[in-house]
Image (tube, rainbow, N blue to C red):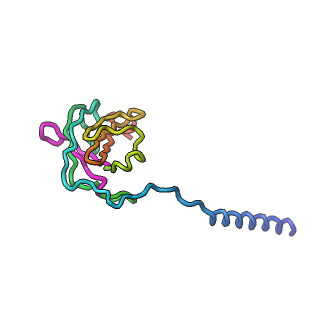
Amino acid sequence: MKKQSVLVGIMMAGLLSASVASAQHKAPNQQPPQEKDVTAPAGDLALGSVRLPKGVSADGKPLPAGTYSVKLTAQEAGPAAVGITEPLERWVEFSQGGAVKGKEVVSIVPQSEVKMVVKDPPPASGGSKVQTLKGNDYVRVWFNKAGNHYLVYLPVAGGATAGQ
């Protein structure tokens, strides 16, 4: 009987210390300040022209290597995800010869937050750059226009992650 009392006491002490530990939780990580006046351009906006060095997928469809005009559309990406500011997730169109060849979701990042999102140096104001990312599975198309950065991530066609 004495053994059982000792075991019950040990179990109770363990439960009590676990509940005290969970009650003393840590504060959440400091989040970057949210800009109250973050504004994405209304309507369509021509972002510029880029040359894709390899075939990629845009919205699940093939987009061959080549030069494309890229336009931000007014269409917001959906469905809404928790924590996403709706107007900052929109669609861009990749066009050649006036015909839309593909579209993909773009993330609009204000100038003040770009260093929290991307480590690489941004393109010059009004410019763009195309980068093959680590692992060669994605191509990032990055525009810097009018105080915002526009980031599009395209899986490489036939890449390791494109078919998974």
Q: Residue at x 63, y 64 (%)?
A: 24
Q: How many marks?
A: 0
Query: Is 11 on the left-hand or right-hand side of 76?
Result: right
- Measuring from the top left, give residue 120's x and y in whole percent: 39, 38
Q: Residue at x 26, y 45 (%)?
A: 145
Q: Residue at x 25, y 31 (%)?
A: 65
Q: Quadrant of the N terminus?
A: bottom right
Magenta residues? 87-107
- Measuring from the top left, give residue 87's x and y in whole percent: 28, 57
- Measuring from the top left, give residue 33's x and y in whole percent: 42, 57
Q: Quick one: which residue is furthest to the top in this view?
A: 53
User: Could you tell me if residue 16 is visible in this image?
Assistant: yes
User: Could you tell me if residue 79 is visible in this image?
Assistant: no
Q: Compare residues 113 and 98 and report the one nearer the observer.
A: 113
Q: Is residue 50 above or below residue 21?
A: above
Magenta portion: prevailing SS class: strand
- Measuring from the top left, give residue 69's x and y in whole percent: 19, 39
Query: Is 140 on the left-hand or right-hand side of 43?
Result: right
Q: Compare residues 92 and 41 and report the one nearer the observer.
A: 41
Q: Is residue 139 above or below residue 90?
A: above
Q: Quick one: which residue is furthest to the right in this view?
A: 2
Residue 54 quadrant: top left
Q: Quadrant of the C terminus?
A: top left
The reply to whether the magenta stretch includes residue 134 is no
Query: Is 16 on the left-hand or right-hand side of 124?
Result: right
Q: Compare residues 162 and 76 and report the one nearer the observer.
A: 76
The reply to whether the magenta stretch includes residue 93 is yes
Residue 118 quadrant: top left
